[in-house]
Image: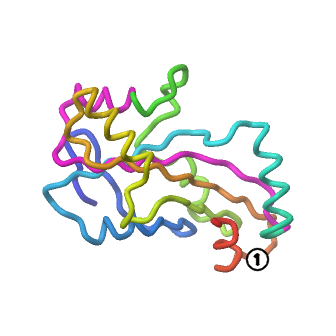
Amino acid sequence: MFQISDHCLLPLLQYPGVLTPHWLRNLLVRWNRSQVLFIFYRKPFLQENEYEELLRKVQEKVACNIVGIRTEQCFNVELEKALTPEKLATLKWLLAETYEPEKLQTCSFLEGEVCGSPYSVIVEVGPRMAFSTAFSTNAVSICKALSLTEVARLERSRRYHLSLQPGSGPLDKCQLNSFAA
């Protein structure tokens, strides 16, 4: 574990069944002690009516043994230095939904369901480390306007919890890559 600030500890363990995006994996490998990384999770990424359509498409194109999908967004916030409690509250306010702030937290909503289950996998789809996205550029500009000058980069990725039919085999790398594409 790395200590992120007085307010948050970030476990950097690789959970079984969790695919970490390249840019985050590279960031953790090239960890700079003078910089701070916060990871926030917000659920859901998709609305209820979108789940059925996505599940149908995934069963057709990836694997018919996928019987359920749940989602969350992951916000990876790179800071130049630790935030004060007031600035941390502002960042949380910015990332949370207006009417559902309880759906933003520093622990994944999905990982508890996957740990130890052979019929679950989490796939995370997000940008590569080498490229700062337009989303990040806009998000950092908004942070600067809110006096969050410590925010150097803010990337968003999507996380999908795929539930597999009990008794079926795990998804292979080709199927996982097909899903992520």
Secondary structure, mark 1, is: loop
Residue type at tag 1: Gly
**Would residue 176 be counted in the magenta stretch?**
no
Question: In percent of the image, x 57 and y 54: which residue is there?
Answer: 159
Task: Please say if 101 is above or below 24.
Answer: above
Instruction: Tell me where residue 132 appears, x and y as whole percent.
Output: 37, 56
Q: Nearer the viewer, residue 52 or 166?
A: 52
Instruction: Tell me where residue 170 appears, x and y as whole percent.
Output: 71, 75
In the picture, measured across the screen, residue 3 lies left or right of residue 26, that is left
Q: Nearer the viewer, residue 80 or 83?
A: 80
Task: Please say if 69 is above or below 13.
Answer: above
Question: In percent of the image, x 24 and y 33: which residue is there?
Answer: 148
User: Badge 1 local density, few (<14 within 10 Å), some, or many (20+)?
Assistant: few
Magenta range is 64-93
What's the image's color scheme? rainbow
Q: Nearer the viewer, residue 107 or 130?
A: 130
Question: In percent of the image, x 73 and y 59: which residue is there?
Answer: 163
Determine the image quadrant of residue 164: bottom right
Instruction: Tell me where residue 144 appears, x and y as whole percent.
Output: 26, 33
Determine the image quadrant of residue 56: bottom right
In the picture, measured across the screen, residue 7 lies left or right of residue 139, that is left
Question: In percent of the image, x 76 and y 45: which residue is there?
Answer: 51
The residue singled out by tag 1 in the image is 169
Task: Please say if 27 is above or below 113.
Answer: below
Q: Nearer the viewer, residue 104 or 32?
A: 32
Quadrant including the N terminus = bottom left
Q: Residue furthest top?
A: 99
**Would residue 65 be counted in the magenta stretch?**
yes
